[in-house]
Amino acid sequence: MDDVELTGGCQCGAIRYALGQKPQNVHVCHCRMCQKAVGGPFAVICPVLKPAFRVTRGEISYFMSSDVGRRGFCSNCGTPLCFDYPHGDDIGVLAGTLDDPNQVPPENQYGNESRVSWYAGLKDVPGDHPTYVNNPEMRLRISSSNHQHPDHETKVWPPVDGECG
Ligand SMILES: [Zn+2]
Ligand SMILES: [Zn+2]
């Protein structure tokens, strides 16, 4: 095991996990199942050996996307979290659920036959808008009522009185 410990979890914070190993063969998967499972144009999957994957809060729910593969998610908030073959050696967490997705640059691509036609041009799509910067009222309403778990470990979530994050 490396001495890194990456952490992550779902949007609501009911499920948190830690990785005791640096993910290997981080890959983009464009397959149609991954598109559906993450609700996006592709999944970024970060595999670790199963003993290195620890759920530190809550319990992951699963949808069997085939007889051999399953998709883990939070049943409270719906965040897709992981993919694995129950009889396989590794489990792939989804990059966006890590507290710091910058730690897992992809090194491989799969399912290119299903890749969306606009993928190659994505970086050239115009626009460079910080989130809601042009709508301060909306920005304030979101930040002052944020139910998303922060990108770090918390002792108690949701916070109780007097407990910050
Ligand atoms: Zn959740
Ligand atoms: Zn896939």
Image (cartoon, rainbow, N blue to C red):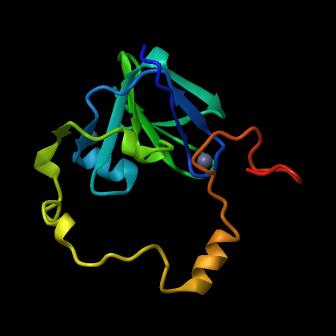
**Between 150 and 65, which is closer to the camera in this rendering?**
150
| Residue found at x 51% / y 44% | 99
**Furthest residue in direction front, as rendered:** 3
Quadrant showing the N terminus: top left
**Between 45 and 100, which is closer to the camera in this rendering?**
100
Residue 32 pos. (x, y %): 24, 49
Residue 108 pos. (x, y %): 18, 36
| Residue found at x 66% / y 77% | 141
Residue 56 versus residue 1 in the image, above or below: below
Answer with the quadrant where ligand 2 appears in the image.
top left
Residue 72 versus residue 67 in the image, above or below: below
Residue 85 pos. (x, y %): 36, 24
Q: Is residue 73 left or right of residue 103?
A: right
**Between 89 and 97, which is closer to the camera in this rendering?**
97
Residue 73 versus residue 1 in the image, above or below: below
Quadrant in the picture for residue 156? top right
Residue 147 pos. (x, y %): 67, 60
Quadrant in the picture for residue 24? top left
| Residue found at x 47% / y 19% | 3
**Furthest residue in direction right, as rendered:** 161
| Residue found at x 34% / y 38% | 104
